[in-house]
């Protein structure tokens, strides 16, 4: 344990590079350790891998990892929910402005913002305001240019899903902070189009891997990569940049519609200056220790000095607006949430409906079997996760949920 820096070293003896993990007091599953160890073998990764306290096994690469690379990019390390992230804004409303029963407001938000996966989670007809947003952003034209080079990428979901939530761990919440101010907070990404782009390029990387003559052992085909200078490298960077911008626009579109429903059903209010919109599944070029690196954050948030971020808990637990401390050892990063401690299957088999209802008794939310895999017991303790990263961020606001919309 390096107590001065606050991280543990997780790498095995003989590893090419270190794994620095902010995991004091939080569990780290063996499968996640093995997945991280596999990543250390890539010759273009380094100077080390940073691991956040919400770390857990992921598909392709470990959730809660910060992967710096030089001259190469690993599509599976970004994943398929490209640009997934958080948005939050503080309002002038106070707890006393909210009705005792928030069920009507939850229902109106669910009608305004399509939720869930499949056709039910899409617009039947995209609202004019969202159509205008899509045109003004240029996202449609940019996607057409990507499609022209990669015709197998499906784009039919673009117009049906901008301004929609999706399923899984995506959510819309009303929260109260330590002064009883009302916040709107939501979590979503680039939806089906981003998923299709991610899946397509992960498969292309695997195809390229089969053609390569490597001078090293690649322990997992999910770590297939593109090399800088290759056409597919540039095409992937272009596509992932598009998906990240689309994800940000998606969150902004949803936020607008949620605020409209609130204005219809609650007393008049204004938005305060505190607002955050940040990715936690993405890649971008950054300079660290005098080196220009491609930094991939999968389930991690940028936490440069003074930068605001969002670390949500699970349904029924606290969430945090944080300010980054710019810790260079973590590549200026922090966790993106609490992190799963149970797989979805395990959660469904372990958590009872009564336990879920007890854990979310103070929140207006779904309390049926379909959301048990998102119940608080399926996640690590957010208090422990926050305690493990005190040298990465400071807490600015502590939020508690009063309404939660799940897909």
Image (cartoon, rainbow, N blue to C red):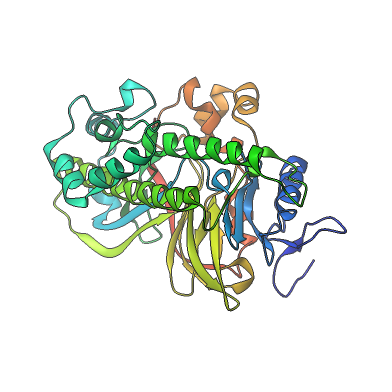
Q: Nearer the viewer, residue 362 or 376?
A: 376
Residue at the limit of the structure toward the right, as seen here:
13
Q: Quadrant of the C terminus?
A: top left
> Could you say where residue 254 lies in the image, as x and y percent from the top left?
27, 43
Q: How many marks?
A: 0
Q: Is residue 265 visible?
A: no
Q: In percent of the image, x 30 and y 35: which residue is there?
A: 164
Residue 125 versus residue 77: which sits nearer the camera?
Answer: 77
* 86 left or right, relative to 334: left
Q: Which of the 4 image quarters holds residue 100?
A: top left
Residue visible at 50% across and 28% down in the picture: 357
Residue 238, x across and y down, in percent = 39, 51
Question: Vertically, is 322 above or below 102?
Answer: below
Q: Quadrant of residue 227?
A: bottom right
Inspect this view and state whether residue 352 appears: yes
Taking 127 as reference, is 88 left or right?
right
Look at the picture and state if 152 lies above or below 189: above
Q: Nearer the viewer, residue 81 or 359?
A: 81
Residue 291 locus on image (x, y percent): 58, 74
- Does 283 sit left or right of 47 as displayed? left
The quadrant of the rendering that contains the N terminus is bottom right
User: As displayed, is residue 21 above or below residue 99?
Assistant: below
Q: Is residue 282 left or right of residue 266?
A: right
Residue 51's spot in the image, x, y percent?
65, 57
Which residue is found at the position 65% from the left and 34% from the top? Answer: 342
């Amino acid at each position: 344990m390096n107590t001065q820096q606050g991280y543990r070293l997780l790498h095995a003896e003989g590893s090419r590079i270190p794994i620095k993990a902010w995991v004091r007091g939080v569990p780290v599953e063996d499968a996640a350790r093995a997945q991280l160890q596999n990543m250390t073998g890539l010759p273009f990764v380094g100077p080390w891998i940073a691991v956040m306290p919400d770390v857990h096994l992921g598909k392709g690469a470990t959730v809660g990892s910060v992967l710096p690379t030089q001259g190469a990019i690993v599509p599976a390390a970004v994943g398929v929910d490209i640009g997934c992230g958080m948005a939050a804004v503080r309002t002038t409303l106070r707890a006393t402005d909210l009705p005792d029963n928030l069920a009507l407001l939850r229902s109106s938000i669910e009608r305004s913002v399509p939720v869930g996966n499949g056709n039910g989670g899409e617009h039947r007809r995209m609202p004019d305001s969202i159509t205008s947003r899509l045109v003004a952003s240029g996202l449609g034209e940019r996607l057409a240019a990507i499609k022209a080079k990669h015709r197998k990428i499906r784009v039919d979901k673009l117009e049906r899903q901008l301004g929609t939530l999706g399923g899984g761990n995506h959510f819309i919440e009303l929260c109260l902070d330590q002064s009883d101010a009302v916040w709107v907070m939501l979590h979503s990404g680039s939806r089906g189009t981003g998923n299709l782009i991610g899946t397509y390029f992960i498969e292309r990387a695997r195809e390229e891997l089969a053609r390569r003559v490597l001078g090293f052992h690649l322990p997992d085909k999910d770590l297939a990569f593109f090399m800088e200078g290759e056409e597919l490298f540039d095409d992937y960077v272009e596509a992932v940049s598009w998906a990240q911008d689309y994800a940000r626009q998606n969150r902004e579109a949803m936020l607008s519609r949620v605020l409209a429903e609130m204005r219809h059903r609650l007393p008049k209010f204004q938005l305060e200056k505190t607002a955050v919109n940040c990715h936690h599944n993405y890649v971008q070029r950054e300079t660290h220790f005098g080196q220009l690196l491609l930094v991939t954050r999968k389930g991690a948030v940028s936490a440069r000095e003074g930068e605001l971020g969002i670390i949500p808990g699970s349904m029924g637990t606290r969430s945090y607006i944080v300010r980054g401390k710019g810790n260079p050892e973590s590549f200026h990063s922090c966790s993106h949430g609490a992190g799963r401690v149970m797989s979805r299957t395990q959660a469904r088999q372990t958590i009872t409906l009564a336990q879920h209802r007890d854990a979310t008794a103070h929140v207006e939310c779904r309390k049926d079997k379909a959301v048990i895999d998102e119940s608080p017991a399926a996640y690590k303790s957010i208090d422990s996760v926050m305690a493990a990263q005190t040298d990465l961020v400071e807490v600015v606001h502590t939020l508690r949920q009063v309404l939660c919309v799940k897909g």
